[in-house]
Amino acid sequence: MSTDSSSALPSQPRREREIASWHEEFDVIVVGLGVAGGCAGVEANRAGARTLVLERASRGGGATAESEGTIYFGGGTRVQKAAGFEDSLENMLAHMTEAAGPTADPEKVKLYCEGSLAHFDFFESCGVEFKDTFYDEKVIFPPTDDCLIYSGNELAYPFSESAKPVPRGHKPKREGSAGTYIIESLIETLTKEGATIQNDAGVETLIQDDAGRVVGVVATVDDEERAYRAQGGVILTTGGFIFNKEMVARYAPDLAKCNFPIGNPKGCDGSGIRMGMGAGGAAVNMSEGLMTTPFFPPPTHIKGLLVNAQGNRFINEDCYHGRVTGAIMSKADGQAYLIVDDALYDEASQFVPYKIAGMGETVAELESELGIAPGHLVHTVESYNASAEKNEDPTHHKASKWVSPLNSPPFAALDLSVDKSVWAAFTLGGLDTKASGEVLTVDNQVIPGLYAAGRASAGLTRSGSHYASGMSIGGGSFFGRLAARSAAANKDS
Amino acid sequence: MSTDSSSALPSQPRREREIASWHEEFDVIVVGLGVAGGCAGVEANRAGARTLVLERASRGGGATAESEGTIYFGGGTRVQKAAGFEDSLENMLAHMTEAAGPTADPEKVKLYCEGSLAHFDFFESCGVEFKDTFYDEKVIFPPTDDCLIYSGNELAYPFSESAKPVPRGHKPKREGSAGTYIIESLIETLTKEGATIQNDAGVETLIQDDAGRVVGVVATVDDEERAYRAQGGVILTTGGFIFNKEMVARYAPDLAKCNFPIGNPKGCDGSGIRMGMGAGGAAVNMSEGLMTTPFFPPPTHIKGLLVNAQGNRFINEDCYHGRVTGAIMSKADGQAYLIVDDALYDEASQFVPYKIAGMGETVAELESELGIAPGHLVHTVESYNASAEKNEDPTHHKASKWVSPLNSPPFAALDLSVDKSVWAAFTLGGLDTKASGEVLTVDNQVIPGLYAAGRASAGLTRSGSHYASGMSIGGGSFFGRLAARSAAANKDS
């Protein structure tokens, strides 16, 4: 956990008139070099703006560098077509509308889908390559350099009812994780195309004029404060706040229960959200996040039965792992077992090594060991098995591919409970922005000169229970570019 | 629905220097004459402050006048003792800590418990009488003039484990509803003791000086604007926002699904919350509320089984009705049936006339009619009945008093789903305040001169799933008084 940002409270801006001298002037200043900042920097620079990207660490990276690098593209990308999948704008929009969650901004969702093919091209223009292949396994990401996967809920009920399922998770052409590759490609592009990158530059303070316009930032470089002026605007792409304990405690009590923060420990401390709030920006959707205990791979575990403390199922196990985990929190009070039989249990392939909460030669024995009231787990398994013989799951609609009877003793219960296993989490709340990236006040007024994108903003996707892998990098990079265009266009205003 | 407040956005204050002339000056100005405002007015006036209470309607009332008037007192009130119940500060604090919900302010909870006996005396000093009797039925409120009931989750699992259950809902001595009686008593007290009440005075605008201090309000009386100056402070007791559709849509999506707003249609439109936000106040807990579909009385219905769309139980049916309803929303996606048999069903005594979603001579028949996958509801009822023979509910811990087998055909399913029945709701979010009533900004700074209490603030109780009847009137009146003392003391600052 980062401790250098010990507060959950807004960071107050400095007044322009207090700035004795400016270190340097740019048109657009981007704070934070993750995927949102990197793409914003490239886009601003290409739009003809003198562009500075400030990065707190000694090299860019952000949460993206810690990730596998999946990007959510659709509507008929080159890779989708090559792999034999037919997607369309309408089909992508139908799924994304659901996937963005109930509190999403429909304008952002629509723009994202409409711009998806061009956004794919943008990444290629930055040297990010994608192989024209589909990886046909239920994985968190391909261990190979293959590209396309089903990275979300496309195939799972009820999402499968509202749009034709196609895969949209695109991992760049690198073995295993490709997050660093994305960032390095962006750094190379920024450098080659003439944008300025200043590493080791911590930014905790915005500079605002008396009319409320954000006109620059204070960065600490080599223990010295530098005031940078921004003619067009400042774009905050500083990430979420999962590594700021005080903010998580204050805003996102469910996420506070998760023991494994996802992101960049040196980055995701909410600094940009706090600066934006200090300048009058509203923070919204702050209680939401993605929570996950990734119980697959092995894919065989999807054939198991997820039950609550009463021995009842409560979600189709073939959903996106984040959706399943969200359901454990909201519907099962954070306590759940994955029931597997000997045929399904695959200890060696587990992504997370779960504790075995109980075992039995019969389900009745297992039930008794778990302290579940007699007959309940037995009924759950028996009734599931009876339908599974017909390849059906009439109660929870798990896709038939994952439906088969559990009948190879011994039976075991893996403990997926929030206080007993690895629960990873990151935040999905942040500054309220227009699709243009402009930061809004609590009364929907634009703060002139201030933009935000990526996890520093409440962006494309607002709910962990609807999310898919690739939507953070996808949304952050896309709306980072839109913010950059807005800020670049603003430089002559 | 009120339409004169068509916006969800903050109401901007007017600057003191724009006020050409003041209509009148007071020490403390209270905006809204419900229970919080009435008690604040009495308390401020008794503290020696020149006190004005402004009420939008032609007479005070607020949500309290629309309610049955239960007040949550404990720690050993005269009524509790007379009825043979032994309570203590520690016991009340143990329960209240849980009942206030996970996001509650522990300082407010502690003060409320410590001050409960004196608060009871305060109501008596305002002429509100309580009969020394206990009404021993599971009701929403006594239809008689009896006083004491179990108004919350005290007897229900898991609350029953953490504190000794005692009743704390105190209804004043009136047949049936007593909300108007409380308000009329406060109006009489205010008048008798020399406070000024101005009815038909709509307040939509605060007056703030250039340093940010709230120094008065603009009230519209007889179509004329009047600027009232407040030497000590302005106390917003304007109620929640359930009647402001835009605010509910923006802040509380679950509550937006409920079709029956609870409160005062002319009052609970969030006007005070919006004024406070306009002056820089933070609004917190805005997504929370109490939701309820009151499926008892008749009390026999508590012996029924509440099941989700898969035929599984998910909550002990003897909880407070609001807790049960909250569980229907969060754990059952808003869809639930109450399964009753012929012995339990009591159509005539129903508080809400539920539609019958299915009927059958056997549970299997009922299950099939409801479209539940074969065997699931049958198992739920059979396993419940088997334990119920022993008066036990091992899966959901319903108290034994309510546990008996369902075995008198025909069986029926009452539809309690959010889109099929009456779901009432009110809001539990509002301005962030200290226990003193001082309104806080997003960075925890006090806004000088501005106070809030009642549903205009995020008060004592923050969660519908933990709530008890009497906590809104209890908390609103209690913290209204604390705010009044703060504002009265502030008049010489």
Image (cartoon, coloured by chain):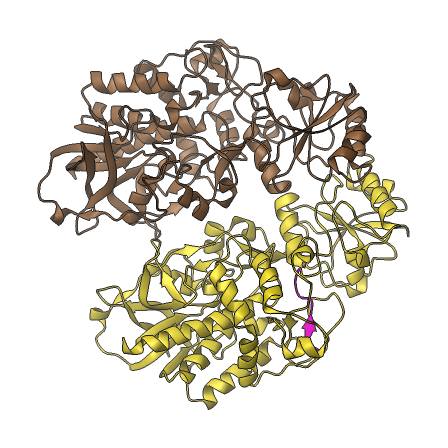
Chain colours: A yellow, B brown
Q: What range of the chain is rendered magenta?
A: A146-153
Residue A177 seen from this side:
yes
The residue lying at 52 percent from left, 49 percent from top is A253
Badge count? 0
Is residue B384 highlighted in magenta? no
Whether residue B448 is situated above or below residue A146 in the rendered picture: above
Q: Position of residue A99 (x, y in %)?
A: 59, 59
Instruction: List x then y, in percent, for residue B392.
Output: 74, 24
Q: Is residue A196 visible?
A: no
Residue A291 drawn above or below residue B433: below
- Work out whether residue A30 or residue A153 is closer to the camera in this orientation and state it: A153
**Residue for point 62% across, 42% down:** B333
Residue B272 in picture, x, y percent from top left: 31, 39
Q: Which quadrant holds the N terminus of chain B?
A: top left
Q: Considering depth in this image, is B410 or B135 the residue closer to the camera?
A: B410
Going by the image, does A23 lie left or right of A137? left
Taking the view exactly as shown, the residue that stands out farthest to the left is B21
- Split into 4 quadrants, where in the image is the C terminus of chain B? top left
Of the pair A431 and B413, the residue shown nearer to us? B413
- Relative to B95, is A94 above or below? below
Q: Residue B388 placed where, x, y %?
A: 77, 23
Dominant secondary structure, magenta: loop
Residue A27 position by quadrant? bottom left
Judge from the rendering whether residue A374 lies leftward or rightward of residue A35; answer left or right.
right
As for residue A147 lying within the magenta part, the answer is: yes
